[in-house]
Amino acid sequence: MRIGPTNATAAALVLVLMARATPLLAQEGDVYRAVTVQAAPGELLNLIDLLKEEQALARAGGEAPAMMFRHSQGDFWDIFLLYPVTDLAAHLPRRVEASRLAPGAGSPESPGPAAELQAAIDGLTTWREEVFVHGPPVEQVTALWAQTGFFHLEMFQGLAGKRDELIAQRRMENDYLERIGKEANAIFTRIAGASTDAFTIGFYRDLAHYAEPNAVSDEAAGQAAIDAGFEGRAYIGSYLRSLILRHHDTLGVAIP
């Protein structure tokens, strides 16, 4: 039994879905740095305080601060941070300079406030992973972040040769969601860094909003899935799983 588009049509679907006019949330154009961290035992609240200081320092320096949420259930890490990167070519040299001036780096120069703060953050961090990604327009993501307070983050590592089809599937699922009256997810695709090929963020008011049932009948939802390119509604998840090596789900609440 098939679980998604046939092999003969899969490649064509990828090309069509990547070229067609898609909802704004499904277009990846701006650059972000996504970071997940696990706090040292008993240090979560202190780490959050330091990350808030980092936000204030970024604002004072004219940079966009990170958008943050705290893990509620799902993956093992504690905090997700999404940093808008307006100029990747300028961002990387600044990070190299900050690390060189960090305490213990062997530089004769005195570390600046950013380097000292980063050293303090590192001192309370047990585990850390980061990835640079393309994502929707920064203005739209920051507006959604400000308007909502509950997030559903899904991270995907695609099978060899399936990355483009994986991203196309995420766009197909956004198409399906919009057809049944739900909000599309923001799609982010890997540039460099961790093994995550793509991740999506769903924006909700709260847990009740996330758990709301479909507003359409099962029959209408089934037709919406077919119209979005799936074999049927029951095949949405199984088709996704035919494209991925790993998949991590996390629910979280905003850190104000």
Image (cartoon, grey):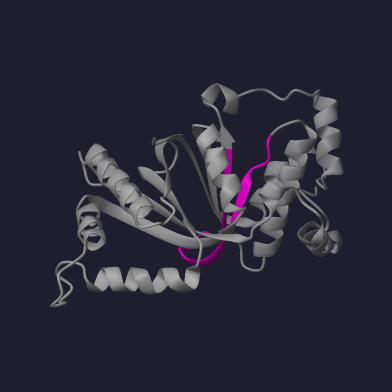
Horizontal side, residue 147 vs residue 229: left or right: left
In the displayed structure, 214 sits above or below 66; it is above
Residue 158 visible in the picture: no
> Which residues are drawn in magenta?
183-202
Q: Quadrant of residue 189?
A: bottom right
The residue at 62%/47% (across/down) is 186
Quarter of the figure that contains the C terminus: top left
Q: Quadrant of residue 181?
A: top right
Horizontal side, residue 23 vs residue 185: left or right: right
Residue 250 visible in the picture: yes
In the displayed structure, 101 sits above or below 256; it is below
> Residue 135 at x, y = what percent?
59, 56
Find out whether residue 172 is within the magenta segment: no
Find out whether residue 186 is within the magenta segment: yes
The residue at 37%/51% (across/down) is 59
Q: Nearer the viewer, residue 58 or 32?
A: 58
Name the main secondary structure of what is drawn in magenta. Answer: strand
In the displayed structure, 43 sits above or below 37; it is above
Q: Nearer the viewer, residue 201 or 87?
A: 87
Q: Quadrant of residue 225?
A: top right
Q: How many marks?
A: 0
